[in-house]
Amino acid sequence: MAKVLVRKGKKQYFEDLDREITVIKEKSFYLDQTSKPFSTQYGEISAASLKKTGTIKTSRGKELRIFDSSFIDDYMRIKRLPQIIPLKDIGFIIASTGIGGDSVVVEGGTGSGALAIMLARLCKKVYSFDVEQKHIDVALENVKTLGIKNITIKKQSLYDPVRVKNADLFCFDLPSPWDAIGTAENSLKPGGFVISYSPTIMQAADFVNSIANNDNFLHIKTVEMIERPWEIEKRKVRPRSKASIHSGFITLARRI
């Protein structure tokens, strides 16, 4: 099992400067190998210490906290090829469609497998499709690394019909998702949801306009999820000056 090491930061007030100064910078390490000693700027940590949880000391007497990694620690370190859908957008997809343990999901393109992996944590089965073998190879490696068993990845275009019926959710992360509406229509059960994820608003608009011309779909909404991190340090509270806000536009529609 992988481990996470944390060196907690520390600030100290200096009277002559009349302000707090960081004397220890916060630092964390992710270790997927714990069978041999690990060297840091704080000193070496023995293999025996890496098997513990709680507080450990380095060879220089510096204290660090150590604990077993969780799924999210492992997930954040998967191999990536194209830009993956961020967690804030995945959260909206999950919450808006209400998928759960009995749900069957179709998605593509697979990319690095990030969305498929997150959905598989909740769903009964995920079928993922991509036309790039390089993407498929990386996604399969990530699926194996995280121990996910309920994902099937196939090399196929979603612009062609897929052999999945009565799906609860169909997710597009494609250059022209409007050309694959028929695929989703044939795969989704009545009441099932379709999600289209696009980096530009014109792609989202083209998809929505195509949905509007199909009597078997109902456009629910198109959104952009905004995440604004804040800095909080005692009474100093402000938004971070450098924040990545835009990621993509999410269109939610329903098969009727």
Image: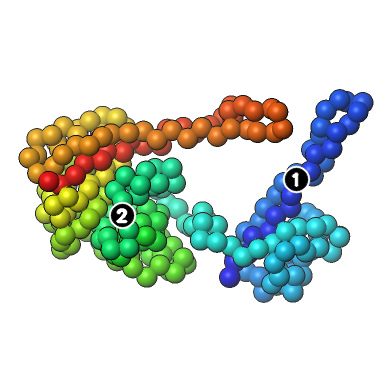
Tell me the residue at 35%/47% (across/down): 95
In the image, taking residue 65 as reference, residue 111 lies left or right, namely: left
Quadrant in the rendering for residue 189: bottom left
Left or right, residue 153 beside residue 72: left
Name the residue type under label 2: Ile
Coloring scheme used: rainbow
Residue at image location 70% in from the left, 33% down from the top: 233
Closest to the observer: 110 or 13? 13
Badge 1: few (under 14), some or many (20 or more) residues near its Cα, within 10 Å? few
Q: Secondary structure at mark 1?
A: loop
At horizontal 72% and vertical 46% (from top left) the residue drawn is 26
For this view, does 208 lie left or right of residue 96? left
Disc 1 marks a residue whose amino acid type is Gly
Instruction: Residue under label 1, please give it.
Output: 9
Q: Earlier in the sequence, mark 1 or mark 2?
A: 1
Q: Split into 4 quadrants, where in the image is the N terminus?
A: bottom right
Q: Which residue is mark 2?
A: 99
Residue at 21% from the left image edge and 41% from the top image edge = 253
Q: Of residues 224 and 190, which is closer to you in this image?
A: 190
- Image location (x, y in percent) of residue 75: 49, 57
- Answer whether residue 160 is visible to the viewer in this image: no
